[in-house]
Structure formats: C-alpha cells, structure tokens
Image (cartoon, rainbow, N blue to C red):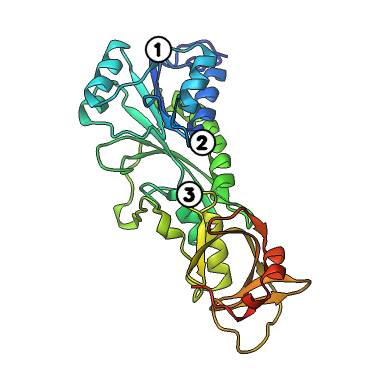
Amino acid sequence: MNPWRKQNGKSMVASPRIAFLGTPEFAVPSLRALIAGGMAPSVVITRPDSPVGRHQDITPSAVKVAALDAGLPIAQPKNSAELVAVLTEHKITVGVVVAFGQIISSKALAVPVDGILNIHPSLLPKYRGASPIQSAILNGDRITGVSIIKLVEALDAGPIVSQVETDITDSDTAEILSARLSEVGAKLLVETLPRYLSKELIPVSQDESKVTMTKQLLRDDGRISWQKSAAEINCQFRAFYPWPGVFTHIAGKRLKIEDLSVLGGSFEPGLRPGQVFEFGNGGMAVMTGSGAVELKKIRPEGRTSVDGSAYLRANKNLTCEVLT
C-alpha cells in the first residue's frame, strides 16, 4: 500500500521528497526500512569516503554501500554550504537523520518545508549527546529506547515526535544493544513518518528539567577502578564493548580485559580490591570493592589474547599482585 494514502484511497499527504542523512551501520536498517516501505529517499546524504584500518584504505560509509546497492542518488557534502546546496537541488521537503556525524546548520534545517527528523537511541530528554547507549548500560538502566525528534540547532533538544521503549538485558553490550536499537528505530521511523507528515503526530517539547547529558568517550574511560563493585565493573565492561574497551595495569603494564563475568559466592577474607586470586578450577579472579569478577579473556600489553585461566597457570605469582 502506498504509505502516503489512506486505505479508502483519499490522499493523506503528497508524496514527499525525502533526504536520508546517515553514515555508519547503525543507520542502514532505517534506510532499508524506508525503501521497503515505499518511502525511498530522493537522495542519500553521507559523509565523504575516509581512510580506515592499518593501511588507511579509502572506504565508503556503510550507508553509501547500502544506497549504491539500492540504486539511489548519493551526495557526500564536505561542509554545511554543500549540504544546503544538495537539499535545495533535490527540492527536499523532509529530512531523516540517523547518525550522520556532521553538524546540521540552521540554514540546512530551514530548507525542507516539513523539517528534519532525527532518530536518537535513548528516551529523551534522558541521555542527550554522543554516548547514550553506553551511558544507559554503564548506569545499570533496565530500560532504554528510541526517540524520533524534530531537529533544532541545540543538541538533541528538539520536540519529540514519537518514542518506543525496549529492555536492556544482563547480556547486552553496547554492540548488541546498538544493533537492536537500530532495528527498533527503523521500525518506528516507517510508522512515524507518514503520520508526522499528515499532522497526525504533533511534536511535543522535551521537559528541560529532566535533561541528562552524555559525553564523547575517550580511551581512558575504560580504566577500571577496583574500588567499585563487581556489578559496576561488569556494567562498565558491557558499556564499553567493543570500544573503548576496559583495562587495568599489572606490574606497571597494561592489561586489556576482553571478557569477564561477576562471580557469586563468598571469598577468602582479607582480599583487597584489585587483588588477583584463583577461583574454582583455576579461574583468574579479581576482588572488587564489593564482590569479585572472573577475567575470562585478557590481552597483556604487547601480546595476543589469552584465557585468564591459562594466563594464571603460566604466572602463578599473580596471586600476590594487586591490579591498578
């Protein structure tokens, strides 16, 4: 069925000229959902190809690859002026932004007559900013979601058009949750866009008294403080997987932790936070401020990954060490 018409055949809204703005894999499900729903964009706008990997090979974005596969027009503006020109040239009436990665100026916002919608992976006004998915896991939240807002100049501050909740499970890492939210957002988008354009959905201002902000993550954010509880450290690991990852130091050398789990039960009295001890059948465990964790997979500085138990067997003196 044509998404721009009601079932009785009466026109709901003139078919819009849509610009889709996105860059990483997170945005691809939304682009594909628009195409499958009969709302293919008039132009797909993504960031310029960029160097990737050890050899810095010039690589197209995931969104560009998906747009090429679908045979859609593509634009890769380098700055705000070029973005305005693209929107104007294609006579865009509404935009959809999903992790575009560039600031959208007031001039660009003013081009589409119906504005620009943005998919944000949190229940706004909670977790505005650069790391909403990681922040939700880090803080031990049990529920998160996706918000679709109408973009304004202020960061993630636009009025809310629609929202949907989803659970955060104990096994969710940022990678897993991000993939799920990208699909949730795609489904919400195709349900929302026709209703928004027909004025069935009216954007509602965010409650500024409930705003929380997130920050751009840095590599050093992954450093573990062993004074925290085992549950908090587990949340940190899951929130920062796969990037920036979590790490500690042993005998002055960096130790990256690639897999860990919270241990149940009681432990030997007198263990200090950060102290390594053997658990069960040779597992490598570390005491925390409350409880303990098992380091199931680690990567010592300058070496390849290894099971924690194997590392402990090869370094029996570690049970005297305190990680920092």
Q: Earlier in the sequence, mark 1 or mark 3?
A: 1
Most extreme residue toward the right is 281
Residue under label 2, please give it: 185
Picture quarter with the N terminus: top right
Does the residue at mark 3 contact the one at mark 2 (Cβ under 8 Å)? no
Residue 146's place in the image compared with 247, above or below, is: above
Q: Report the mark closest to the observer, 3 or 2.
A: 3
Q: Earlier in the sequence, mark 3 or mark 2?
A: 3
Residue 133's label in the rendered image is 3
User: Does residue 142 show up?
Assistant: no
Q: Nearer the viewer, residue 6 or 190?
A: 190
Indicate the amino acid at tag 2: Gly
Indicate the amino acid at tag 3: Ile
- The quadrant in which residue 46 appears is top left
Residue 14's label in the rendered image is 1
Q: Nearer the viewer, residue 232 or 120?
A: 232
Q: Residue at x 56, y 56 (%)?
A: 238
- Number of numbered labels in the structure image: 3
Query: Which element type, helix, strand or loop, lies under badge 2?
Result: helix
Side of 145 relative to 83 (left or right): right
Indicate the amino acid at tag 1: Ala
Q: What whole-number distance in Å separates the C-alpha atoms at marks 3 and 2?
A: 13 Å
Query: Which element type, helix, strand or loop, lies under badge 1?
Result: loop
Q: Report the mark closest to the observer, 1 or 2.
A: 2
- The quadrant in which residue 265 appears is bottom right
Q: Report the mark closest to the observer, 1 or 3.
A: 3
| Residue 22 image position (x, y, % from top left) | 42, 29
